Image (spheres, helix red, strand yellow):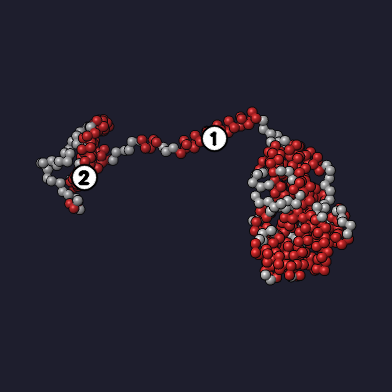
Amino acid sequence: MNCIDMERLIDPYLDGELTGSLRVEFDAHRLRCPQCQQKLSLIEACEHILAGDQRVPALADDFTDRLMACIDGHAPQPIPLHARRRLMIGAGLGLAAAAAVAVFIALPDRDTSSRAQPLAPELVRAMGDKSGVDVKSYMDSRIDQLYSVPNRLVRDMRGLPDLALGLAAPAEAGESDMLGLFRLLFPTIEGPHHGVGEPERDEEPPVVAPGLDRI
Amino acid sequence: METREPVDAGRKASREDELKLIARAKRGQPDAFRSLVDAYKERLFAFVWRMIRNHHEAEDICQAAFAKAFESLRSYSETYAFSTWLFTIAYRLSLNALRKRRAYSGETDFSQVGSGESDAAITLASSEEARRLRGLIWDAVDRLSPPQKTAVLLFYSEGKSCQEIGVVLGVPQVTVKSHLHRAREKLRELLGTEMAADWLAVRNLSDSSLA
């Protein structure tokens, strides 16, 4: 170890972090080198004086009394137990009310989801054209039938792919796709309609829409 | 938290007793806080006085530090030693005082550093040489920047670890080590020319100070 190495290791040595072989080499160099020995002794002496010299002016005898007198005058009063309980209950109620308001605000507007969607204009016209049928009464009765005949509904649903192929025919006949689908799903409506999965025998076979022949 | 062996462990209340006192003081019991004040006032005053070098001003700062500690006692966290927290408050108040005095800059205004005043207040050793060397060392410490001086005082006089000193200064531990390193270099530089021929006397002085 040379003087440059020793210079670099002075701080770890003074901090008590120099250990092992490095510490051994450090001590050995210190014994051999008068300049490094002087340098280290100087700083060690400073440290000893700084650590050991406790001579300071005496603190006034009434220091604590004066301090406590000042503090007592501004001491925050401890909260009584009963008041603390009331505070906790009040805080709890307030939190619960705030949570309720937040939940109420965050809830979706259910009215919009349950509001009845207006029927398509062409569908209303189509229904109105069917000799005075009470649309609402009809819809209600039809819904009741659907609920009461789940098997028939399942059968209807199974036939939908074939029915979809037939949708092209009503459109070409000048009727809207929606009306055609409505007729397919609600066969009691007057007018030309296809039976469930079966085309009318008196009608021409449906024209398959372009592209659907490959299905 | 890492803590070095304190210089005078007998003066410090045990950690457990201290925590009990703090808990009672938080509940508003003034006698508990009085006990804490009595346990730390001497050490705190020594630190502040060495920073400020003015007796009355140092006393005022200590009063303000304790008052501030009392007001903020509810925010004290047991993560740090109470002394570390207290010294942090005192350090910041001392810095404010130094700034107000306009003695705080990169280079300290030595004319404001009352080493003569401190000598008059201190009980001095009979040896004239010891007095001269001791004065040189403290003058050299007074020439350090406040962060370096604080690091030196807390490290050697208070026996605080670099981690605790970092809390007081509000800097990382590695910065504290840098402060100590630069302080030692500066002390060697300032004292080197003065004491080069007296280094044996310095060594004898340091040995006698330990006795």
Tell me: A16 left or right of B129: left
Identify which amino acid the numbered label 1 is placed on: Leu
**Which residue lies most toward the top here?**
A82
Q: Residue B162, position in %: x, y?
A: 68, 55
Q: In which quarter of the image is residue A79?
A: top right
Q: Do labels 2 and 1 share a chain?
A: yes
Give the percent coordinates (x, y) of residue B189: 76, 67
**Vertical side of A60 occupied by B199: above or below:** below
**Would you say residue B17 is visible in this rendering?**
yes
Q: Which of B123 and B62 is in front in this view?
A: B123
Report crowding for label 2: few under 14, some 14 to 19, many 20 or more residues within 10 A (C-alpha). few
Instruction: Please say if A159 is above or below A138.
Output: below
Task: Kindly state the secondary structure of the residue where label 2 is placed.
Answer: helix
- The residue lying at 76 percent from left, 44 percent from top is B39
Q: Residue furthest left?
A: A202
Position of A32 with respect to B120 (left or right) is left
Which chain is disc 2 placed on? A
Residue A121, located in which quarter of the rendered image?
A: top left
Q: Which of B79 and A134 is in front in this view?
A: B79
- Marks counted in the figure total 2
Q: Name the residue under label 1.
A: A95
Tell which of B169 and B11 is nearer to you: B11
Q: Residue A161 carries which label?
A: 2
* Distance between the alpha carbons at the discs numbered 2 and 1: 56 Å
Q: Which of marks 2 and 1 is nearer the N terminus?
A: 1
Residue visible at 31% across and 38% down in the picture = A118
Please state which of residues B88 and A192 is positioned toward the viewer in this rendering. B88
Subunit bearing disc 1 = A
Name the amino acid type tagged 2: Pro
